[in-house]
Image: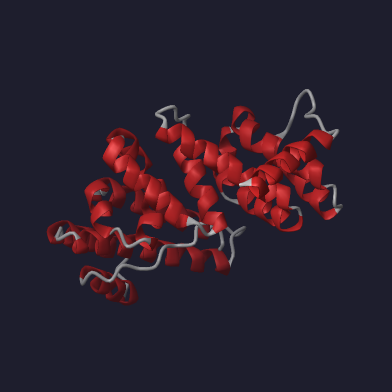
């Protein structure tokens, strides 16, 4: 406990030592890039100050950074933490504060998504699964709205029945097809190469197979068959059909690494 308190004090003191202040008209993307440059230059306190600012303020200035904030920014923060331990402790403190707010019914919008995303880059998905179990028992409304952010962690923990309680097969299928069609349009764009096409195809098959497998494990076979039919109508591919048939037997794919992990 003394070690933890010491780390927290060190982290807060280190941030206080930073002379950095955001400009009058901050550009979150520029500030995030500056944090990376500060890390490379070993200006660690400045880098941490900028990560903290970006986490708290980026969406106020640019809502389109939602995905970057939950993925690349957290991954970069972890990399900073490998060189500068107070940064890692500060990231865990941000996560733990979100946990406390949720359990005290004082959650801010996005708290569970932040909690889940940070746990993912830290390899601590079990904490996400445990919090979702708590939500299932204590706050059903927040559990429903947070399920998408929790699914990977629940699969890691093999809580398949709990997944089944919250899966809306029609809505999930609609989203899978929507993303696939967006990816198909992007593939036709010359700016995206073969690597993106490979990613898009694997993402589609993985998402569809996961949905089918979770439905099958929960004995929702009719829905699983409807998903298979719709997916194969969208893309009549023998390899995809084979994966979907395996999923129908209850073979749940390993969670998809969202952040390149």
> Is 239 situated above or below 24?
below
Q: How is the image coloured?
A: secondary structure
Comparing 10 with 51, the one in front is 10
Comparing 170 with 187, the one in front is 170
Whether residue 253 is visible: yes
Residue occupying the point 23% across, 56% down:
161
Residue extending furthest toward the front = 2
> Is 153 situated above or below 201?
above
Q: How many marks?
A: 0
Residue extending furthest toward the top = 24
Residue 174 is left or right of residue 103, and the answer is left
Q: Where is residue 140? Give x, y as percent.
A: 28, 36
Residue occupying the point 31% across, 67% down:
252
Residue 221 is left or right of residue 63, and the answer is left
Comparing 55 with 258, the one in front is 55
Which of the 4 quarters of the picture holds residue 121?
bottom right
Residue 176 is left or right of residue 108, and the answer is left
Residue 121 is left or right of residue 152, and the answer is right
Q: Where is residue 257? Give x, y as percent.
A: 49, 62
Residue occupying the point 59% across, 60% down:
192
Q: Where is residue 122? Give x, y as percent.
A: 56, 56
Quarter holding the C terminus is bottom right
Q: Where is residue 187? Give x, y as percent.
A: 51, 60
């Amino acid at each position: 406990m003394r070690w933890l308190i010491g780390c927290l004090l060190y982290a807060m003191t280190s941030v206080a030592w930073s002379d950095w202040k955001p400009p009058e008209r901050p550009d979150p993307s520029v500030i995030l890039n500056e944090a990376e440059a500060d890390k490379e230059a070993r200006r660690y306190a400045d880098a941490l100050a900028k990560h903290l600012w970006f986490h708290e303020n980026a969406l106020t200035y640019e809502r389109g950074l939602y995905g970057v904030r939950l993925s690349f920014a957290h991954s970069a923060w972890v990399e900073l933490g490998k060189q500068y331990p107070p940064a890692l402790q500060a990231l865990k403190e941000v996560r733990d504060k979100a946990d406390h707010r949720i359990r005290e019914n004082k959650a801010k919008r996005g708290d569970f998504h932040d909690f889940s995303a940070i746990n993912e880059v830290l390899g601590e998905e079990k904490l996400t699964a445990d919090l979702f179990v708590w939500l299932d028992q204590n706050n059903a409304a927040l559990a429903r709205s947070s399920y998408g952010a929790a699914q990977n962690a629940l699969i890691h923990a093999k809580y398949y029945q709990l997944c089944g309680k919250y899966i809306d097969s029609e809505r999930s299928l609609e989203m899978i097809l929507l993303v696939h069609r967006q990816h198909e349009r992007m593939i036709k764009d010359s700016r995206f190469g073969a690597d993106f096409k490979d990613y898009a195809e694997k993402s589609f098959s993985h998402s569809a197979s996961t949905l089918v497998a979770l439905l099958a494990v929960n004995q929702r076979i009719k829905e699983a068959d409807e998903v298979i039919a719709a997916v194969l109508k969208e893309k009549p591919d023998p390899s995809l059909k084979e994966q979907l048939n395996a999923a129908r037997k209850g073979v749940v794919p390993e969670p998809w690494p969202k952040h390149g992990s």
